[in-house]
Structure formats: C-alpha cells, structure tokens
Image: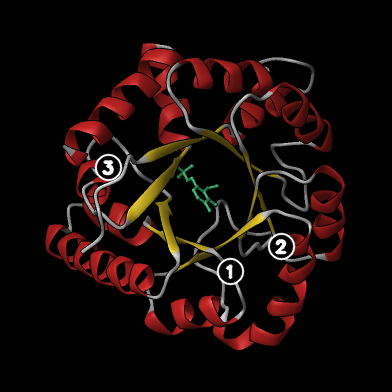
Amino acid sequence: MAEQQKLRLGVNIDHVATVRNARGGQYPDPLRAAKIAEKAGADGITAHLREDRRHISDVDIEGLMDVLSVPLNFEMAATDEMQKIALRHLPHAVCIVPEKREERTTEGGLEVAREENKLAHFIAPLRDAGCRVSIFIAADQRQIEAASRIGAEVIELHTGAYCDAYAEGRFKEAQEELRRLQEMATMAHGMGLEVHAGHGLTYDTVSPVAAFPEVRELNIGHFLIGEAIFLGLEPAITEMRRLMDEARS
Ligand code: PXP
C-alpha cells in the first residue's frame, strides 16, 4: 500500500485555446488561464501541442515556459518534430500521448508494448536532458510493464473508459473500470513508477480516482474549462481541488 501523499492537480488549458482558435485572434488567452489556475491551486499546467495545432500553438508553449511559476507538463506525440520542440524548451515533464488526426480527443492510451524499441530510443534524449518522461497508457498490465522497460519514470493512466461508462449510466462497467485502474495503479507503483491519471474527469467522477493512494497527480482540462463558463475558472478549479483533497483525507 502506498503512503498517502498530497495529490497534485495539473490543469490542462488546451480548450481555452480551442475557444480562442474558433475565431482566431488573441482571446481567451491560455496564458491568462494558466496564471488563474496557478492562483486557484493548480500544482502544474498541462498543454498538448498537437501536430495539427488545433488548440495550443507553438507561441503558447513559448509563453507558458516564460510565465509559469509551476511546472509545465508538455503533452506530445512521439514525433521528431515534437522531440525537437521539447528539447528546445526543456519543460519539467513530457507526457507522450498517441495522436490521430481524425480523433476529437486522445481516445486511447499509447501502444508501448508494440513500439518498445522505438519509444525507448525516442524518450532517451528527453530523459538525458532532464525532462520527466510520462507515458499515457490504458490500465493494462502489458503496457505498464513495457513503459517500465523503456525507462519511463511516470505513467499516466487513461481514465476515459471509466468516465464514459459513468456518463452513459453504465455504472457496473464504471465500477469495473475503477477496479482495473486501482489494480494497475498499485502494480505500477510497486514497480517503482510514479502514477498519474486523467482524461474525462469531472466533479462526479474525480473522487474515487483521487482516493487511490498510489496516484500522485490528476490532469484535468475539458470539464474545468467548460465549468468555468458557469462558475468562473478560479472557483471551478477550487471546487475540483476541494473534492480531490476530501477524497484523499
Ligand atoms: N491527460 C492526458 C494525457 C490527456 O491527453 C488529456 C486530454 O488532453 C488529459 C489528461 C485531460 O483530459 P480532459 O481534458 O478530458 O480532462
């Protein structure tokens, strides 16, 4: 059993950029959102620079590196272009995610087991440069073992299947997904990996995941940015932080 440690909240600001890009121009500004998130208690900021630049832009990443007081978790696909950008900026953490142009969001975890050699070579320079490398994967023993073998320090477990099942009222499946997430978090932690989790989390789904003692960080974006329309960004994040702390106590 893992020792209970503070659970970090990484706020993903991608969808502030989605709204900005719907019109072009300068607002809403993802950097301003990042500073508000810091004030509201975010322990880190997450941003995904996609190959098609549909939300976060190269200029946003440059700006985040300049203005943030908390660590940047830079999400990216395993491509040469992204590796160069990460090595130029040297963010605190790099999270390797799968990316398909036609998907609306990061639909599944990375297929590490099949691409072990390639990924091991891909992450080595990032690690050597001092970035903490995280791999976004499904709660699947094969993928976790492969992530450990390639030298990742962190895995982020994809909570999308759990959140989708919950949102669609398939509560038995949601419970089953939660059980799998818990089991895999325990296993990964036992292997010496730091365990993060995220994707699709909301006020309704965050607590059981936040309660897993092995999970050190949650990355949450879309729901918070949506909720900010009704509550404002700072209160939306403060409430998420409260639910996480309550689940942990
Ligand atoms: N973690 C990772 C690795 C992601 O790719 C995403 C989505 O970009 C998130 C967390 C956050 O997911 P959501 O925006 O659904 O909260």
Above or below, 226 relative to 49: above
23 sits left or right of 69 in the view: right
Q: Which mark is residue 206?
A: 3
User: Is label 2's Cβ within 8 Å of ligand 1?
Assistant: no
Residue found farthest to the front: 3
Q: Local crowd at mark 2 within 10 Å, few (<14), some, or many (≥20)?
A: some
Colour scheme employed for the rendering of this structure = secondary structure
Q: Earlier in the sequence, mark 3 or mark 2?
A: 2
**Residue located at (43% from left, 12% from top):** 232
What kind of residue is marked 2?
A: Arg
Camera-nearest residue between 181 and 223: 181
What kind of residue is marked 1?
A: Ala
Above or below, 100 relative to 25: below
Q: Earlier in the sequence, mark 3 or mark 1?
A: 1
Q: Position of residue 51 (x, y in %)?
A: 77, 53
Q: Nearer the viewer, mark 3 or mark 1?
A: 1
Q: Which mark is residue 127?
A: 2
Query: Which residue in the structure is indicated by mark 1?
Result: 152
What kind of residue is marked 3?
A: Val
131 sits left or right of 139 in the view: right
